[in-house]
Image (cartoon, rainbow, N blue to C red):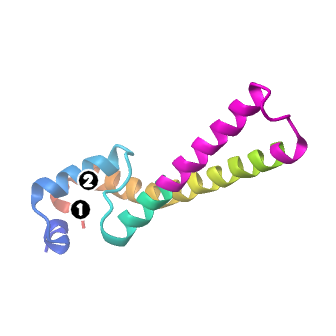
Amino acid sequence: MTLCDNRKIDASTGLRRLVREASAFGPSLEGESRTAVMALTAQLKAVGVNLNQVVRAMNTGLVPSSEAILTNVQACAEQIKRAEAMFVSICEPRFQKARAALSEGVGDAK
């Protein structure tokens, strides 16, 4: 049985996914994984918007710069770095597997 048969997808879809992963664009996610990553992305985007608003307010003098605000902004930045590292840790093994499959030949990928 081939990789496409195992996943119940046609060869065209399988090849697109393989090329996407081998190009380091990340895996093609489905089901719960896709929903979780989309929710995380929405949350990170909201945090980014909030951070931009805080920094803009500080730069225009609407909010005085303070150690507490700086500490919270730095904590948010650290959380974002951890989320990025988590996503990379999810994508990297699939990237390596896809690259190996392409170097061996698409038909041989398991």
Indicate whether residue 68 is drawn in magenta.
yes
| Residue pictured at 66% horizontal, 42% vertical | 51
| Residue pictured at 45% horizontal, 61% vertical | 39
Callouts 2 and 1 close, C-beta under 8 Å: yes
Magenta stretch, overall SS: helix
Quarter of the image with the C terminus is bottom left
Q: Earlier in the sequence, mark 2 or mark 1?
A: 2
Q: The residue under label 1 is which amino acid type?
A: Ala
| Residue pictured at 74% horizontal, 25% vertical | 60
The segment highlighted magenta reads 42-69
Q: Is residue 96 left or right of residue 57?
A: left
Residue that mark 1 sits on? 109
Tag count in the figure? 2
- Please tell me in which quadrant of the rendered image residue 97 appears: bottom left
- Please tell me in which quadrant of the rendered image residue 94 appears: bottom left
Return the residue nearer the eye: 79 or 6.
79
How far from the left and from the top, in percent, is residue 89?
52, 59
Q: Is residue 69 left or right of residue 49?
A: right
Kindly report which numbered mark, 2 or 1, lies closer to the viewer in this rendering.
Answer: 2
Secondary-structure class at tag 1:
loop
- Please tell me in which quadrant of the rendered image residue 2 appears: bottom left
Question: Residue 18, labelled with which disc?
Answer: 2
